[in-house]
Amino acid sequence: MSIARHKSRLQVCCDHCPASYPNTYEAEDFDVMISDARTGGWRIVKARVDAGTGDDTSDLFGQAPRVAGKKSDKQGYLHICPDCQKALNADRSTLI
């Protein structure tokens, strides 16, 4: 999970390692949290849809039809900490 939620507090967590941005924020300060994390060197980008995973393609074709079952909690963004961004170029291709 990219954004950890505990009660009314939010925190940005890396999608590739156990790191998290040290500050926590109230839900209404979501935009401030994202801005602070980016200023702190975090990369936050919209995730690409991988056709082989069966993920949502609503950005390509409009609203996807509802399929039976619980809606996925997957978030549409990747959150990458500064340390993971420094990975070797060969490993880096898997981050984005």
Image (cartoon, rainbow, N blue to C red):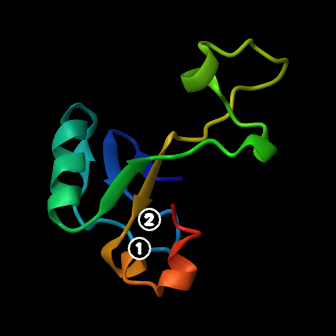
- Give left or right: position of 67 versus 50: right
Q: Looking at the picture, tell me which residue is in the foreground, 62 or 2.
A: 62
Residue at figure coordinates x 16%, y 55% from the top left:
36
Residue under the point 23% across and 58% down? 37
Q: Residue at x 74, y 12 (%)?
A: 65
Q: Quadrant of residue 54?
A: top right
| Callouts 2 and 1 close, C-beta under 8 Å | yes
Location of residue 69 (image quadrant): top right
Residue 5 located left or right of residue 28:
right
- Are there few (<14), some (14-19), or many (20+) residues within 10 Å of tag 2? many
Label 2 belongs to which residue? 14
Crowdedness near tag 1: few (<14), some (14–19) or many (≥20) residues, C-alpha within 10 Å = some
Q: Secondary structure at mark 2?
A: loop
Q: Amino acid at mark 2?
A: Cys
Specify which label sits upstream in the sequence, 2 or 1: 2
Mark 1 residue element: loop
Q: Which residue is mark 1?
A: 19
Q: Position of residue 83 (x, y in %)?
A: 36, 81
